[in-house]
Image (tube, rainbow, N blue to C red):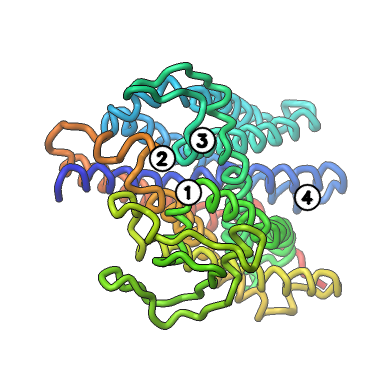
């Protein structure tokens, strides 16, 4: 493995690992806070126990996310020194604010975990909300920094120099809102389906149904709302990408030739040598509408992009298809969920629906990872779009391959530790938190 590939692989591994824990940290506190609120309003002990059970999971994921996030911050400087040399002063503000949000989140989580029976009950609930809001803010700020890489702003690039730097304009670049919205909805969808699926499994196993039904409804409602809203944010993102990064859109749809109108491809096998896609289902004019709001609009293909500026098509296209396909499947589950909810039927009597949620446990995170592959691989060969190429930003230090192997071992070890802690926590739930009440 050459050093350039090793550096990219290490960054991809680190981001792919961290993104799961950061999304859980953004979302789980809101589940916890809602359950806590329900206990305060109804005095139902099941909600209190559920809040305590979820808070332990939040603590585990917070610690893991802190470790993996710290490693990422070092990697940015060690693996991409040329990038940080120029980009740091420009988009450093969202990273600085993210550090502040993380600091607030850590303090609030400490208050919440150790504040039971010590703090005013509503202030205690408020600290849980602060954990959620600050975690969500952290995610949005990091996405703003990534959005800047896709839509550079806040500086003038003259003669190879970065002049007239404006950090505020850099942070609120043209891509930040659409990316942040899409990411937040994805986080709620992925985490919601994962949590709901675990509780659905416990219901199917007839383990303390009342406890797990209440948990399932909270997580599933968040998940299904997110899944149904996700296409709206996806449409916003697609139109934004079509305007700013036509090469990425062309790679997403494997559009090798400019077309007017352009069809939307579903599936298909990409042949990068003869620049064709075989076996795809074509929806005439749909890509033109998604990109420009007009079924007859022209969509720029890769034939209008210089070859040395074209992203890898096959990877980008397959990742996009996985993201959209899994998102559509979760939308269908969401429709079934709300249909059953509005009919006021007990989910305990719908094992087929619960099994769908169990099946969907990993799907949200697979779609999430695929979405980030589209974002990052689709931007190549640029690390700062149109300004700096990825190969020009990598460290000249030899032996990066060894660093990749070491970090891989660390992340693998962390995965084992987290899996063990979560398994132990789930096994403890019936003993410590569940109330064995029959569902009528």
Point out which mark residue 385 bears.
Answer: 2
Q: Position of residue 129 (x, y in %)?
A: 71, 35
Tag 3 or tag 2, which sits nearer the N-term?
A: 3
- Depth-wise, is mark 2 or mark 3 nearer the camera? 2
The image position of residue 85, as x and y in percent, is 33, 23
Give the alpha-carbon distance from disc 1 to disc 4, as whole Å.
52 Å
69 with respect to 405 (left or right): right
CB-based contact (under 8 Å), mark 1 and mark 4: no
Looking at the picture, tell me which residue is in the foreground, 114 or 288: 288
The answer to which of marks 1 and 4 sits earlier in the sequence is 4
Q: Secondary structure at mark 4?
A: helix
Q: 219 or 316: nearer the eye?
A: 316
Marks 3 and 4, the one that precedes in the sequence: 4
For disc 1, the marked residue is 245
Q: Nearer the viewer, mark 3 or mark 1?
A: 1
- Residue 142's tag is 3
Q: Residues within 10 Å of mark 4 (few under 14, many from 20)?
A: some
Q: Earlier in the sequence, mark 3 or mark 1?
A: 3
Residue in the image at 42% along x and 83% along y: 279
Q: CA distance from mark 3 to mark 4?
A: 37 Å
Say which residue label 4 marks: 45
């Amino acid at each position: 493995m050459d050093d350039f590939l090793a550096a990219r692989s290490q960054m991809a591994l680190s981001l792919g690992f961290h993104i799961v824990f950061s999304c859980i940290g953004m979302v789980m506190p809101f589940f916890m806070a809602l359950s806590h609120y329900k206990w305060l309003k109804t005095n139902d002990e099941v909600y209190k126990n559920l809040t305590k059970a979820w808070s332990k999971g939040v603590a585990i994921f917070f610690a893991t996310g802190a470790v993996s996030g710290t490693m990422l911050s070092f990697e940015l400087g060690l693996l991409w020194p040329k990038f940080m040399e120029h980009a740091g002063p420009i988009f450093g503000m969202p990273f600085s604010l993210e550090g502040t949000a993380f600091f607030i989140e850590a303090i609030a989580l400490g208050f919440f975990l150790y504040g039971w029976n010590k703090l005013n009950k509503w202030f205690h609930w408020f600290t849980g909300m602060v954990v959620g809001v600050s975690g969500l803010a952290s995610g949005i700020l990091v996405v703003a920094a990534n959005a800047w890489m896709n839509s550079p702003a806040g500086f003038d690039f003259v003669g190879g120099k970065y002049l007239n730097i404006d950090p505020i304009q850099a942070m609120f670049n043209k891509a930040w809102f659409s990316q942040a919205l899409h990411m937040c909805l994805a986080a709620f969808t992925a985490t919601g389906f994962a949590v709901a699926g675990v509780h659905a499994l416990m219901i199917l196993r007839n383990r303390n149904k009342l406890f797990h039904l209440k948990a399932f409804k909270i997580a599933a409602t968040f998940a299904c709302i997110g899944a149904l809203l996700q296409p709206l944010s996806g449409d916003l993102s697609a139109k934004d990408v079509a305007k700013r990064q036509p090469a990425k859109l062309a790679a997403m749809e494997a559009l090798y030739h400019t077309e007017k109108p352009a069809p939307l491809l579903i599936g298909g096998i990409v042949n990068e040598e003869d620049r064709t896609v075989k076996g795809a289902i074509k929806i005439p004019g749909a890509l033109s509408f998604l990109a420009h709001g007009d079924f007859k609009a022209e969509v720029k293909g890769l034939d209008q992009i210089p070859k040395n500026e074209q992203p890898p098509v096959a990877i980008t296209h397959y990742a996009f298809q996985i993201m959209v396909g899994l998102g559509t499947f979760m939308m269908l589950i969401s429709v079934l969920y709300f249909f059953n909810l509005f009919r006021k039927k007990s989910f305990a009597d719908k094992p087929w629906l619960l099994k769908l949620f169990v099946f969907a446990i990993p799907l949200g995170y697979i779609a999430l990872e695929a979405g980030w592959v589209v974002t990052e691989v689709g931007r190549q060969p640029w690390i700062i779009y149109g300004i700096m190429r990825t190969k020009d930003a990598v460290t000249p230090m030899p032996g990066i391959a060894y660093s990749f192997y070491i970090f891989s071992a660390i992340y693998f070890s962390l995965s084992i530790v987290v899996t063990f802690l979560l398994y132990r926590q789930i096994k403890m739930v019936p003993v410590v938190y569940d109330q064995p009440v029959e569902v009528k």
